[in-house]
Image (cartoon, grey):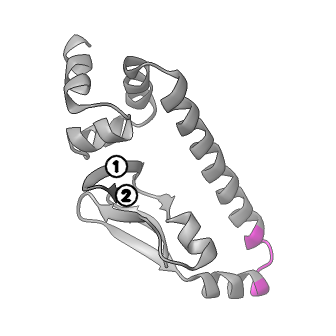
Amino acid sequence: FPSHDSTQGSARSFYLKDNKDTTVSFTLEYEFTTTMHSFITRKPSYENIEAMEKTISGKISHEDLWNLFEIYPNLERTYRLILEQYYITLEEQLIFSKFKSAKERYLEFMETRPKIIHKASVGQIASYLDMSIETLSRIRGKI
């Protein structure tokens, strides 16, 4: 269950439930992405990672990462910082979806992740923002 560092291109994380595709996150160039639960537990994940365009990425196995920690102990600090950022992003996303209106979610998304708008489909963006395509289209039409 590899982790990935997208050095070129873009990707999205998503899961399928009842034949419904739900986007969880987007990754751009030089950003880190993984199915964290799967990477930590080394068990299959419900989450998938899909390239949205031609992408070049690196990967490292759990075992190889732990071996690197033995050789370079300072890497553990970097790993901790990545985990902290991952947690913060998840918490913000939870708050984002629960307490903000659809328009607020879209405006914040445009402000913080504008490149995604040109890389992801309308359906993927709507799914990520927890709204229907129709609601997203209505919001975009008013802006």
Q: Is residue 11 left or right of residue 143?
A: right
- Quick one: 83 or 130, which is closer to the camera? 130
Q: In which quadrant is the C terminus drawn? A: top left
For disc 2, the marked residue is 15
Residue 96: percent from left, percent from top: 52, 30
Q: Establish if 136 lies above or below 20.
A: above
C-alpha span from label 1 to label 2: 5 Å
Query: Which amino acid, mark 1?
Result: Thr
Quadrant of residue 77 in the image?
bottom right
Q: In the image, which residues are magenta?
A: 70-76
- Quick check: is 32 in the magenta stretch? no
Q: Which residue is mark 1?
A: 22
Identify the image quadrant of residue 99.
top right
| Left/right of residue 116 with respect to residue 70 in the rendered view | left
Query: Residue 47, percent across and down?
Result: 42, 63
Task: Name which residue lies at 50% across and 65% down.
Answer: 35
Q: Earlier in the sequence, mark 1 or mark 2?
A: 2
